Image: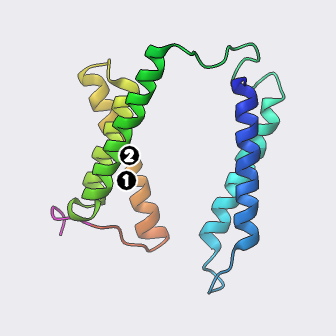
Amino acid sequence: MSPLLRDRLGSLLMLAFVATLWVQRDYTSPFGGMFPDTMMAFMVFFIVLTLILSFTPWSAMPKDEPAVSKDNASTTSSLQQVLVVIVLLALWTSLYRPAGFALTGTLGFAAIAWYLGDKHDGARGIIRALGLGALVCFVVYMVFDYFLLVPLPPGLLFE
C-alpha cells in the first residue's frame, strides 16, 4: 500500500469517526457542546482539506515514493521509538497530578519532541525542545484556565 493511499484511507476513516461522534452527541446544557462541536468542525475541515490536497500536485507525498522499508533495522528502530514514547507518556500521565500540568507538560512534551526530532542536535536541540514544550503548555494552560475556565492541576511546586 502506498503512503498516499494509506493517508487517504486514514482520512476517510477519521471522517467516518467524526461523523459517528457528531450523530451520537447529546449535551446536558445549551453551551455544553460548544467546545466539542467546534473541535469536530475543525477536524472535518482539515480532514477534507487533506483529502482534497491529496488529489492535487500539492500533495504532501510524491506519488512514486516507495512503500515503507521492510528492512529489519528500521523496523527495530521504529519499534524502539514507539516503546520509548509509550514509556515517556506513561511517566507523564503518572506524574501529572502530583507534579502539576506546567512542569510535567513542559518536560513531557520536550522529552518526546527531543527524542523524536532533535536528539542529534546536542544542547541546542534540548533548549529548542524545552522552549517549544513551554510554549505549547503555556497556550494550553491559557485556553483551559481563561477561555474554558477549567483549572489544571498546579502540582506541589505551584500550590
Q: Is residue 108 left or right of residue 32?
A: left
Say the numbered circle drawn on residue 135: 2
Segment tinted magenta in the rendering: 154-159
**Quick check: 125 above or below 73?**
below
Instruction: Estimate the x, y position of residue 136 in percent, counting from the top left.
Output: 41, 47
| Residue 60 coordinates in the image, percent (x, y) | 69, 25
Q: Which residue is mark 1?
A: 138
Magenta: main secondary structure: loop
10 magenta-colored: no
Secondary structure of residue under mark 2: helix
How crowded pointer 2 is (Cα within 10 Å; few <14, some 14-19, many 20+) is rated as few
The three-letter amino acid code for the residue at tag 2 is: Leu
Mark identifier at residue 67: none
Q: Residue at x 78, y 30 (%)?
A: 54
Q: Nearer the viewer, residue 4 or 138?
A: 4
Viewer-closest of 4 and 53: 4
Q: Are marks 2 and 1 in contact (CB under 8 Å)?
A: yes
- Callout 1: SS: helix
